[in-house]
Image (cartoon, rainbow, N blue to C red):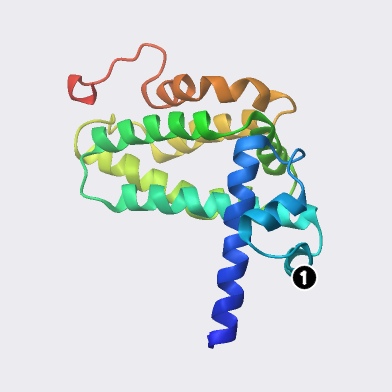
Amino acid sequence: MNGFERRKELKKTNILEAALALFLKYGIHKVAVAEIAKEANVSQVTIYNYFDSKDNLVKEVIVFYVHQIWEEYKQLFDSDMPFPDKVKKMIFDKKDYAKQTHEEFFNDFMTEYASENNYIEKFYTETVLPNILKLFEEGKKQGYVDASISNEAILFYIQMFAEYMQKDGASQNMLSMTEDLTKLFFFGIAGKVKESLY
């Protein structure tokens, strides 16, 4: 990549970061391209040259956001941290993301997830799921996950959550319940987990 291409990519990343910050704070529809341009320190023409339209920019911001979150989780998954600490961090990180996310942006994010053949679902299936299974295998080896539970059952359980999230209107109530849903996902209703998880 030459100097011109590097500068172009840097400018594009700056626009995506600026747009994401504004969308998370105010929602997508309340943020104008002019505001994004001002935040990114570029002209509106530059934004349209890079993304053609606000709709295309929104789609790329969602992909950018997915990758940003995934990079943080990947570092967590790849770390030497014990399984219980990884689970705790996942729960409380999700809670923090929920607090920082405008409801409208979350709903738009979930609408994109619910659309057919979308990038988010493909990325989730091909990248996220295999790493979640790897994490659960780690939990089994460390004695925190019942070794008798098959990967197929774990995948089925994950898929139930994922499919519900794609239903119309489901996302409206989910944001406020992020922490509770994450705990239910990992610990079930009884919540019988090892003392070291707390």
Looking at the picture, how far across and down is residue 18, in whole percent? 60, 53
Looking at the picture, how far across and down is residue 46, in whole percent? 74, 68
Query: Of helix, strand and loop, which one carries label 1?
Result: helix
User: Which quarter of the figure is the C terminus placed in?
Assistant: top left
Residue positioned most to the right = 53
Q: Quadrant of residue 93?
A: top left
Q: Quadrant of residue 81?
A: top left
Q: Is residue 113 visible?
A: yes
Residue positioned most to the top = 190
Viewer-proximal residue among 14 and 109: 14
Residue found at x 67% / y 23%: 172
Residue found at x 40% / y 47%: 73
Residue positioned most to the bottom = 2
Residue found at x 52% / y 30%: 98
Query: Residue type at mark 1?
Result: Asn
Q: How many marks?
A: 1
Picture layout, residue 106 above or below residue 122: above
Q: Is residue 117 visible?
A: no
Left or right, 182 with respect to 52, comes to left
Left or right, 183 with respect to 146, comes to right
Looking at the picture, how far across and down is residue 38, in whole percent? 67, 55
Picture layout, residue 105 above or below residue 53: above
The residue under label 1 is 49
Left or right, 171 with respect to 136, comes to right
